[in-house]
């Protein structure tokens, strides 16, 4: 789905509902959409993990400034929020794996990732392992 300037707050979600299936939960249009290749998925591949490093004394993911600016701009205009992205995940328009990568691209701290209910345990273990390496590299232990 592409951003379009004609949407005001709440209209994007209504457009998604009309374009991608009925609110009654009919999944046939979701299956049809996937069959057409409109939902970008590649079976068996996970989203990559962003590099982790120090920023102002905090271990965090390397942010992508473009992603952060896009979210900030869309949020200020009332067209997008983290909550609306979570709705897309719940509706199957994106995966929890996509959401995990998205917050990494925003530069979330490693410690904050543990507070997010959609981050699987195995991903937290992987993140902690990488954070331990960063910690040891800096502290020489």
Image (tube, helix red, strand yellow):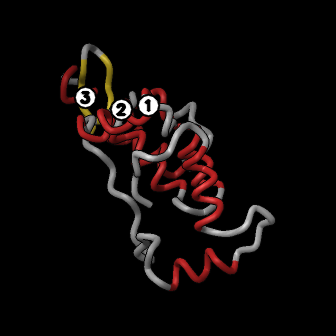
Q: Residue at x 62, y 48 (%)?
A: 87
Q: In the rendered structure, which disc, 1 or 3, sits on the residue that comes first in sequence? A: 1
In this view, the residue farthest toward the right is: 24
How dense is the environment of label 3, judged by Cα within 10 Å: few (below 14), some, or many (20 and up)?
few
Residue carrying label 3: 136
Q: Residue at x 58, y 57 (%)?
A: 15
Quadrant for the N terminus, please: bottom left
Q: In the rendered structure, which disc, 2 or 3, sits on the residue that comes first in sequence? A: 2
Residue 141 image offset from top left, x and y in percent = 24, 24
Marks 2 & 1, CB-CB < 8 Å contact: yes
Q: Is residue 8 above or below residue 72?
A: below
Observer-nearest of 10 and 97: 10
Q: CA distance from mark 2 to mark 3?
A: 37 Å
Relative side of 34 to 130, left or right:
right
Q: How many numbered marks does the figure carry?
A: 3
Residue 61 image offset from top left, x and y in percent = 31, 35
Q: Is residue 132 visible?
A: no
SS for callout 2: helix
Residue 2 image offset from top left, x and y in percent = 40, 57
Relative side of 140 to 39, left or right:
left
Q: Residue at x 53, y 46 (%)?
A: 85
Q: Nearer the viewer, mark 2 or mark 3?
A: 2
Q: CA distance from mark 2 to mark 1?
A: 6 Å
Residue carrying label 2: 73
Observer-nearest of 133 and 39: 39
Q: Residue at x 35, y 35 (%)?
A: 106
Disc sitting over residue 77 in the figure:
1
Marks 2 & 3, CB-CB < 8 Å contact: no
SS for callout 1: loop
């Amino acid at each position: 789905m592409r951003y379009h300037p004609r949407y005001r707050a709440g209209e994007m979600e209504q457009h998604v509902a009309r374009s991608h299936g009925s609110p009654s939960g009919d999944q046939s249009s979701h299956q049809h959409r996937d069959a057409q290749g409109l939902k970008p998925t590649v079976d068996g591949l996970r989203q990559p993990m962003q590099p982790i490093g120090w920023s102002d004394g905090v271990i965090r993911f390397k942010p992508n400034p473009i992603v952060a600016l896009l979210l900030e701009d869309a949020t200020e205009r009332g067209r997008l929020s983290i909550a609306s992205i979570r709705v897309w995940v719940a509706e199957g328009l994106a995966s929890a794996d996509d959401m995990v990568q998205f917050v990494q691209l925003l530069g979330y701290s490693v410690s904050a990732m543990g507070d997010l209910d959609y981050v699987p345990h195995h991903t937290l273990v992987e993140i902690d392992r990488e954070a331990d390496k960063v910690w040891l590299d800096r502290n020489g232990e």
